[in-house]
Image (spheres, helix red, strand yellow):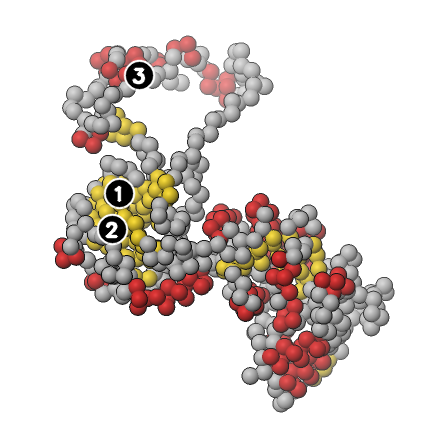
Amino acid sequence: QPSSALLSPPQPSSVLLSTRPPPLLLQPILAQPPSCLTQSSSCLLRWPPSERLPKNSRSRLSMGEARPNMDLKAKTPKKEERPGLPKTPLPVHMAYTLDPPRYGDPRGYFQELYNMQRYPSHDFKQISISRSQRDVLRGLHCSAYGKFVTCPEGAIFDVFVDLRPDSPTFKKWFGQVLSEENKRQMYIPPRCGHGFYSMRDNSKILYMQEGCYTPGLDVEIHPFDPEVAIEWPKAAKEYILSTKDMNAKSLKEMMPRLQELSDKEKFGSTVDFVVMGASGFFGTKVCSMLREGKYNFAMMPKGVRLNDRRAIERKLDIWKPKYLICCAGTAGKPNISWCEDHKEETIDINVTGQLNVAEICRQRGIHCTLFGTGCLYYYDEAHPMGSGKAYTEEDEPNFKDNHYGRMRAALEALVENFENVLSLRIAFPIDGAMHPRSLVGKLVKYPKITSTPTSYTVMDSLFPLIPEMAKKNVTGIYNFTNPGVTTNSNILKIYKKVVNPSHTWVDMPTPQDGKNKRAYSELDVTKLKKLFPNIPSVDQAVEEAFMAHKE
């Protein structure tokens, strides 16, 4: 129960207003102080006596008793959203400044450094602060993440230069004063070289970073490089530099490294394609194929996970792609048996994560390609082995003996509701380059193998069709295998003929009964062949893939 002293109006003698003049910084702000500060103490906030609760009201309310005249059905008034802060674009691509409001009185001031509801969208991973004495110069440091900087104490001349070769403002620099007085905040895009000169003692700089600093991954450029030609306020000899910054290389010397990073990251321009999971088995093949086809594409950074929605959105809003190919997912570690013991993780990656990407793309009008599995069926009475009766995309999956397949089937049923999604069923992928995770990369390690006729995906012949399907805005579910069936034994015979004549193995029978089913079947590719009539048969495609990578 609050004491009566806390509920009664304060006495005039209890009001303490400073008679000292406001600090120099606040004098312009308080040129016309709020009227309540010049009036009597009655303007101070207090609990009006008319709103005091009666005795024991706390215990009665906690037991669910309503206050008199309380409308239990009344809706809480909708909160008015505060308007977003306008940003001022800068001459460097994607860079901008903000001038946030500051609220002050003789006691001091209050200011927001960041508000996700009012500021432009960012996904900050690290917040850092540095302090520098007068005449200290730091930079130029180029990171793979954007930085949002401000100077909460002191003053700095802040500079950055565009080091993205694919940017329309490559090599253009911009500099301005950031200080406690002007309260300005500046966004520096990824792969821009950043530096500053401390104009006062104990200047403090606050960095909000879109990535975490990792030693060895930054690029340093000399701050007085004549090719960049930054107009610093003082002569070079008047600054205090670290040994690292004094020994930094020139832009010309670092150009090969910057070009390599630009080709990989594409931070300075828009792209047509974005590849998620670019470092995995499917991802490396897709990127290689896009590179050979001279497509304009970017690779989503490895640290951006399928469930990291804000990070994905941020990258897509920078790149503005037309198409996204999601190669991220899990088929188990080292095989799909892993999924049986990690069911929740499998759902999170192969169902929830994929739907997350599909929805992000749908909201932005981006065509989205997902990879499913063709291992959803087994031979049955309606589709007996060797009959030529293949499973179409409309047939209900009948192989449900593992968690991995069940979740892929569940995903298919859900993505059918997305008009922007192309789902490709992959079966026993074969890579002519012998990737360790490809089927042949595994088969050649086994002294004994099983051999049952089934459908296969020869990546060398089918993956080049993926960007074509995206550009044609093809959506829906497709059996993405080569026409016909073959066996593991036939594939190894082709491998022995083309690649390694000394290779040997032993064929073993494959159990295929009611107790021990295998996901072997023939998939109908009529739907795919309507788009691409000249797809090679599986045996032909395997031989062509091995021949192309023979050396």
Kind of residue at disc 1 = Leu
Comparing 159 with 312, the one in front is 159
Residue at point 30%, 49% (across, down): 174
Q: Do the residues labelled 2 and 1 touch (CB within 8 Å)?
A: yes
Lower position in the chain sequence, tag 3 or tag 2: 3
Q: Mark 2 points at which residue?
A: 196
On the image, the x and y values in percent for residue 56 come to: 45, 15
Image position of 43 (left or right of 450) = left
Q: Give the answer, above or below, for where 61 lies relative to 248.
A: above
Q: Mark 1 points at which residue?
A: 178
Quadrant location of the C terminus? Answer: bottom right
Lower position in the chain sequence, tag 1 or tag 3: 3
Residue at point 74%, 70% (across, down): 483
Comparing 21 with 140, the one in front is 140
On the image, the x and y values in percent for residue 181 come to: 24, 36
Residue at point 75%, 62% (across, down): 530
Q: Mark 3 points at which residue?
A: 44
- Mark yes or no: residue 420 visible: yes
Kind of residue at disc 2 = Phe
| Secondary structure found at label 3 | loop
| Secondary structure found at label 1 | strand
